[in-house]
């Protein structure tokens, strides 16, 4: 382990974001719920959509809807061009070296399952090990357990410290000559910890280990550069980056994608089909069987353009400030314990309130118009590690404000009063 694996936090750049102006781009943010102004702090579950995304999807269905890669008619050609253009936009967003490295999926979950069932199932053997961590979302645990059961491989997990950081000494011990795949989350949805992914990936690659990064939470909050990270695969979901549900991205390095077998068969993923057998199209088509989520991909393209227009550095700087403010204010409340106090964090504030079940915390806040998530966040091993059944989780996006944090704090005071 090296002391530089967790970089020293730098003071945030003073990049101005006109949050009040940007909020106007999101129609839902002016909604009232339960008679109160909505305070949406459940962005890790799904983000809200700017008008640019809503309009792109509406426009597609109103004026361009057709199937892609199949028709010779005008609409089909337009839809095909619009769909294929988004691949280039995604490649730029994460700095992939080519649009051919971008596979459209239904989301992070499907991307990881694709890698497990295609790359994993075709290469893993009995005795091999898949290394994950103790802070993974179920999406980055269960697919590996499934492929391990199919191949005789074993899943091992890097433990986490009391602060919610990876134990890097343990990582070094667990990365052995038996390790074949490292699958690690960049930003934990349950703790907010940012993992030193570049360092972990470099360590793994020195040993020839194939690496997958779960970018479901990092893509909306951190600048992502897959070439700088050095990972072989990177998965994220459209709906968390202000795009539609039902669409996601799997980045895969070309050399690997080209060697991988398809995991689903159907239209558009073949080169030739006879009744005796079939041959496969080149990636990414090889991994996109059937009619894809065309409108959603187009909406995703609009979302990424929107994020780039707002500015990812400015987003990061504002969110860092907001999380620091929320951490200070919520952390100062009597009877509130923060779960996840890593040195490097983004967007997520998980906590428990003494003597109050997180679901009750969520219900009281809901009554105040404040939307948070309460539960295990599909990260049950994290809950087990911290000895809690669940946590309450506020998760921020760039359109959240200090006033909204203050409303959250007032709501939490009410929780304490009601359950005292
Ligand atoms: N986490 C949350 O509330 P999908 O469902 O495929 O879009 O994303 C799965 C996923 C994978 N990895 C991480 C780190 C995630 O946070 C998620 C989704 C949501 O925390 C819904 S459970």
Image (cartoon, rainbow, N blue to C red):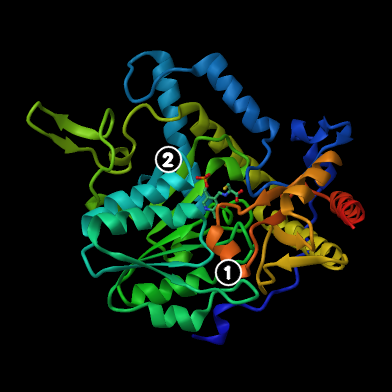
Query: 317 or 177, which is in the foreground?
Result: 177
Rendered residue at 66%/72% (across/down): 342
Query: 41 or 313, which is in the foreground?
Result: 41
Q: Please state if 95 lies on the left or on the right of 333 as rendered.
A: left
Rendered residue at 69%/75% (across/down): 9
Q: Earlier in the sequence, mark 1 or mark 2?
A: 2
Ligand 1 contact, mark 1 (Cβ < 8 Å): no
Say which mark, if any, is on residue 136: none
Q: Secondary structure beneath disc 1?
A: helix
Q: Name, please, the residue furthest toward the left.
A: 276
Whether the residues at callouts 1 and 2 have beta carbons within 8 Å, the answer is no
- The picture places residue 104, in percent across and down from the top left corner, at 42, 40
- Image depth: mark 1 or mark 2 in front: 1
Q: Please state if 183 lies on the left or on the right of 60 as rendered.
A: left
Q: Which residue is mark 2?
A: 105
Report, in whole angstroms, how far the alpha carbon at label 1 lies from the one at label 2. 31 Å
Rendered residue at 77%/67% (across/down): 337
User: Quick check: can you spot residue 182?
Assistant: yes
Vertical relation: 207 (above or below) 19? below
Rendered residue at 75%/32% (across/down): 28
Q: Please state if 416 lies on the left or on the right of 66 as rendered.
A: right
Ligand 1 contact, mark 2 (Cβ < 8 Å): no
Query: 117 or 400, which is in the foreground?
Result: 117
- The picture places residue 27, in percent across and down from the top left corner, at 76, 31
Q: Give neighbour class at mark 2: few <14, some 14-19, many 20+ (Cα, 10 Å).
A: many
Q: Which residue is mark 1?
A: 385
The answer to which quarter of the image holds residue 350 is bottom right
């Amino acid at each position: 382990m090296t002391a530089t694996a967790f970089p020293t936090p730098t003071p945030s750049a003073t990049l101005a974001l006109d949050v009040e102006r940007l909020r106007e781009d999101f129609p839902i943010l002016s909604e009232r719920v339960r008679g109160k102004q909505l305070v949406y702090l459940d962005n890790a579950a799904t983000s809200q959509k700017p008008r640019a995304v809503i309009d792109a999807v509406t426009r597609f269905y109103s004026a361009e809807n057709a199937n892609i890669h199949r028709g010779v008619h005008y609409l089909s050609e337009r839809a095909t061009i619009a769909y294929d253009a988004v691949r280039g936009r995604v490649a730029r967003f994460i700095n992939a070296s080519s649009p051919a490295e971008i596979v459209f999926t239904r989301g992070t979950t499907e991307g990881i399952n694709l890698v497990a069932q295609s790359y994993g199932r075709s290469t893993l053997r009995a005795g091999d090990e898949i290394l994950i961590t103790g802070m993974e979302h179920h999406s980055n645990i269960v697919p590996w357990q499934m492929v391990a059961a199919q191949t005789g491989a074993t899943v091992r997990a890097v433990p986490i410290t009391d602060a919610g950081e990876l134990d890097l000494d343990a990582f070094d011990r667990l990365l052995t000559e038996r390790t074949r795949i490292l699958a690690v989350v960049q930003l934990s949805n349950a703790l907010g910890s940012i993992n030193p992914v570049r360092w972990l990936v470099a360590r793994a690659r020195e040993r020839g280990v194939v690496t997958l990064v779960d970018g479901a939470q990092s893509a909306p909050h951190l600048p992502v550069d897959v070439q700088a990270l050095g990972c072989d695969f990177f998965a994220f979901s459209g709906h968390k980056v202000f795009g539609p549900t039902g669409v996601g991205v799997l980045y895969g390095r070309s050399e690997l994608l080209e060697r991988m077998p398809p995991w689903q068969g159907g239209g558009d993923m073949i080169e030739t089909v006879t009744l005796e057998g079939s041959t496969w199209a080149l990636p990414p088509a090889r991994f996109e069987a059937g009619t894809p989520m065309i409108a959603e991909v187009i909406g995703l393209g609009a979302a990424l353009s929107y994020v780039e227009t707002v500015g990812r550095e400015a987003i990061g700087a504002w969110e860092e400030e907001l999380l620091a403010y929320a951490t200070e204010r919520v952390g100062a409340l009597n009877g509130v314990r923060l779960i996840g106090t890593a040195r490097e964090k983004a967007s997520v504030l998980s906590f428990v309130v003494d003597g109050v079940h997180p679901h009750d915390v969520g219900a009281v806040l809901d009554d105040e118009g404040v939307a948070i998530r309460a539960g295990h966040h599909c990260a049950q091993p994290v809950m087990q590690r911290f000895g809690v059944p669940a946590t309450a989780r506020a998760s921020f996006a760039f359109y959240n404000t200090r006033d909204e944090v203050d409303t959250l704090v007032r709501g939490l005071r009410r929780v304490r009063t009601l359950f005292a």
